[in-house]
């Protein structure tokens, strides 16, 4: 008997970068040296104080369920981080610790969007957001953005594209895949546009701490009613620990806690106790040193790609990606990426992962690998372009 799966599963697309990673691992198992510039995962190991805190938690027996919203000490530590970094007084009760930022985004959409409604977001953008919405029978409303608006939505676009079934807007600053950052003034204008339409505003701030030459503004500085999603994966380098958080208006907290109870009971206990060490001064100093290194990698990669003729109309201000235009080099960026992997063992991500708008013109390079490996990747790309 043929298997019969739900319609929603059929609609949900694979995460193409993970398909590329799977093939890259296969090539490595065959003895090939693959330069990884596809996955958004810092190559640095978990900071030693965090690993030590995890071991201590296990020794002390902190391995059972916690409250669904997270241990109070971590919610307080995150609250203190907002005071230290942004000068914001965020009550710990407004912080919900989640099973990764993915858990936070899924809960935010489940709270704010009914079946049949849409959430407006930029195209290109992080691909899984579309799939989270499909899972709850809502839909992503993709709005094309280009370099002339820094690959970010504008208030004019919010007004022009608003529909009767639009529930809200999702922004990302810094953004994946472009590294584009919204200023405090831009965040304020966008928040005003969304609220004038009676919608909800959700802002992905996962890459805060990974901006170069300046610190990104938080939307909470201009809109206390916004929902903010963040993660321990990027700046804090804890990808496999699967821990994130959401800051929500106080009235939404009981509903989010209810969702957390039902979706995953509680975040990883050991990860939560480990994350307490992330806010210690010595640990933050480690992250700031890594931030400096990411900045150096960005500068070299942007320079190298431009020297090879790739189009980078706007240099990334944050995150750890370069979104490069290859439309003059190929008429099929998806096939180009697979050919790079198979022929030169260089793994990069096709624009098709991030939406529909000019998706076949762009590829994303991740500079989450060393300068030495970036140089090797550039040499392999040079070799491919010379063919």
Image (cartoon, rainbow, N blue to C red):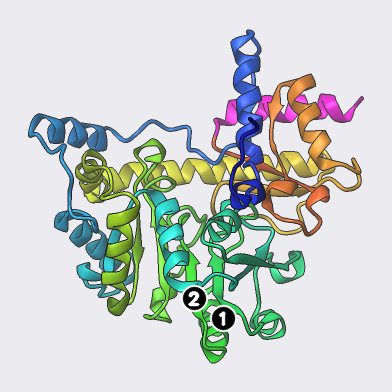
Helix, strand or loop status at disc 1: helix
Q: Using the rendered image of the protein, determine whether residue 279 is visible from the camera's viewpoint.
A: yes
Neighbours of disc 2 within 10 Å: few (<14), some (14-19), many (20+)? many
Helix, strand or loop status at disc 2: strand
**In which quadrant of the rendered image does the C terminus lie?**
top right
- State the residue position of label 1: 190
For residue 106, side relative to residue 183 (left or right): left
- Residue at image position (56%, 46%) is 320
In the rendered image, residue 371, in percent from the top left (x then y), is placed at: 58, 31
Q: Quadrant of residue 383?
A: top right
Do tag 2 and tag 1 residues touch (Cβ < 8 Å)? yes
- State the residue position of label 2: 201
Q: Using the rendered image of the protein, determine whether residue 37 is visible from the camera's viewpoint.
A: no
Q: CA distance from mark 2 to mark 1?
A: 9 Å
Q: Earlier in the sequence, mark 2 or mark 1?
A: 1
For residue 294, side relative to residue 3 (left or right): left
Tag nearer the camera, 2 or 1:
2
Which residues fall within the magenta stretch? 369-387
């Amino acid at each position: 008997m043929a298997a019969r799966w739900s319609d929603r599963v059929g609609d949900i697309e694979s995460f193409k970068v993970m398909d590329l990673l799977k093939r890259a691992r296969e090539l490595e198992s065959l003895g090939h040296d693959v330069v990884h510039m596809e996955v958004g995962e810092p190559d640095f190991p978990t900071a030693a104080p965090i690993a030590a805190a995890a071991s201590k938690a296990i020794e002390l027996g902190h391995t059972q369920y916690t409250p669904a919203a997270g241990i109070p000490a971590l919610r307080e530590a995150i609250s203190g981080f907002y005071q230290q970094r942004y000068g914001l007084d965020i009550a710990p009760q407004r912080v919900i610790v989640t099973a990764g930022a993915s858990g936070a985004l899924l809960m935010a959409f489940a709270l704010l969007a009914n079946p049949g409604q849409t959430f407006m977001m930029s195209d290109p953008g992080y691909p899984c957001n579309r799939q989270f919405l499909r899972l709850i029978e809502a839909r992503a409303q993709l709005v094309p953005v280009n370099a002339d608006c820094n690959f970010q939505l504008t208030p004019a676009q919010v007004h022009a594209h608003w529909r009767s079934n639009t529930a809200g807007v999702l922004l990302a600053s810094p953004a994946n895949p472009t590294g584009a950052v919204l200023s405090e003034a831009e965040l304020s204008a966008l928040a005003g546009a969304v609220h004038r339409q009676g919608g909800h505003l959700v802002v992905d701030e996962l890459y805060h701490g990974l901006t170069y030459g300046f610190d990104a503004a938080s939307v909470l500085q201009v809109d206390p009613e916004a929902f903010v999603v963040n993660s321990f994966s990027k700046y804090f380098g804890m990808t496999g620990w699967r821990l994130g958080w959401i800051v929500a208006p106080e009235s939404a907290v009981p509903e989010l806690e209810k969702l957390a109870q039902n979706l995953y009971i509680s975040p990883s206990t050991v990860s939560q106790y480990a994350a307490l060490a992330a806010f210690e001064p010595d640990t933050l100093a480690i992250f700031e040193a890594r931030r400096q290194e990411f900045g150096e990698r960005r500068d070299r990669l942007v320079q190298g790609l431009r020297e090879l003729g790739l189009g980078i109309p706007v240099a990334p201000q944050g995150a750890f990606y370069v979104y490069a235009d290859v439309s003059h080099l190929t008429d099929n960026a998806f096939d180009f990426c697979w050919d790079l992997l198979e022929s030169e063992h260089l793994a990069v991500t096709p624009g098709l992962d991030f939406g529909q708008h000019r998706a076949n013109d762009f590829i994303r390079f991740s500079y989450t690998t060393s300068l030495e490996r970036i140089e090797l990747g550039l040499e392999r790309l040079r070799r491919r372009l010379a063919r």
